Amino acid sequence: MRYGLPAPLCKFFASWAIVLLLVAPAAAEDRLTIVALGDSLTAGYLLGPDEGFTHQLEKALKEAGHDNVTVVNAGVSGDTTSGGLARLDWAVGPEADAVILELGANDALRAVDPALTRKNLQEIVARLKERNLPILLAGMLAPPNLGRDYGESFNPIYTELAESEELILYPFFLDGVAGDRALNLSDGIHPTAEGIGIIVERILPKVEELIAEAKERAAE
């Protein structure tokens, strides 16, 4: 006696097997990983695991319909552009499809020569572009106490780099948060969870531009 499924059922399950084989790889290919390369502002200094920039950004993206986007936290507290450049190759791994570049705040706090900051950012961008990774450049402004000359040298770096390298630019990462005591920790520098929420809300359209560019490149 022979046992088995009726022929119609066999055809049904065979058809679904083919569909699953076709759909599963496509779903995996649709996944997109954004690496946020930054300092303590990215790392989530003194914040809970679900309060930092990358976690809140990924949540906001999901709420906006970007279900297949993962945001990786490659922020290191205290990092300068020199530090970011030194760890670039392992911080932005092969899984990366796009990069949010948020570095320079500590350069300004330490009064690093703006020429060095510019050079480091240019090198980071050049190496990411060699890998064909789209970049969202998050800008920073020098603290006023460093004086007018320093600010005039430091502040234009991000706009000029974005223009020359054709990068997506968010001019000031702390827009809407800097200087507001209610949105910063007691040090007056690092945002609270609420402050991070405002940053995420404001930068979100630029991140969606980054996602669109990453998808376009993946389709080429």
Image (cartoon, rainbow, N blue to C red):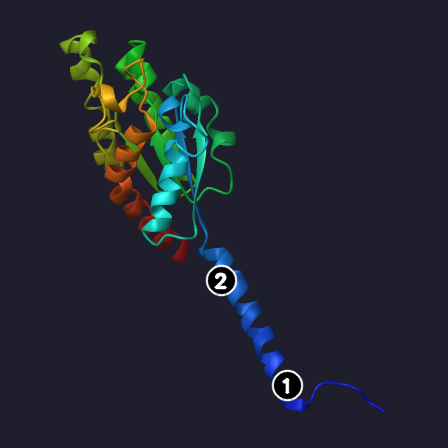
| Label 2 or label 1, whichever comes before in sequence order | 1
Report whether 65 appears left or right of 35.
Answer: left
* Viewport quadrant of the C terminus: bottom left
Q: Is residue 69 left or right of residue 8?
A: left
The front one of 77 and 87 is 77
Numbered label tally:
2
Question: Looking at the picture, does residue 80 appear above or below residue 94?
Answer: above
Name the foreground residue: 153 vs 180.
180
Q: Residue at x 44, y 23 (%)?
A: 76
Residue at the disc numbered 2 = 26
Residue lying furthest front: 182
Q: Position of residue 147 (x, y in %)?
A: 17, 8
Of residue 44 and residue 149, the one placed in the foreground of this image is 44
Quadrant, the N terminus: bottom right
> What is the number of the mark on residue 89?
none
Q: CA distance from mark 2 to mark 1?
A: 26 Å
10 Å crowding of disc 2: few (<14), some (14-19), many (20+): few
Picture coordinates of residue 6, whole percent (x, y): 69, 89
Report whether 128 appears left or right of 18.
Answer: left
Q: Position of residue 125 (x, y in %)?
A: 35, 32
Residue carrying label 1: 9
Q: Say above or below: 210 vs 90.
A: below
Q: Amino acid at mark 2?
A: Ala
Residue 19, located in which quarter of the rendered image? bottom right
**Secondary structure under the numbered disc 1 in the rendered image:** helix
- Quarter location, residue 78: top left
Q: Amino acid at mark 1?
A: Leu
Is residue 167 visible from the viewing direction of this image? Answer: no
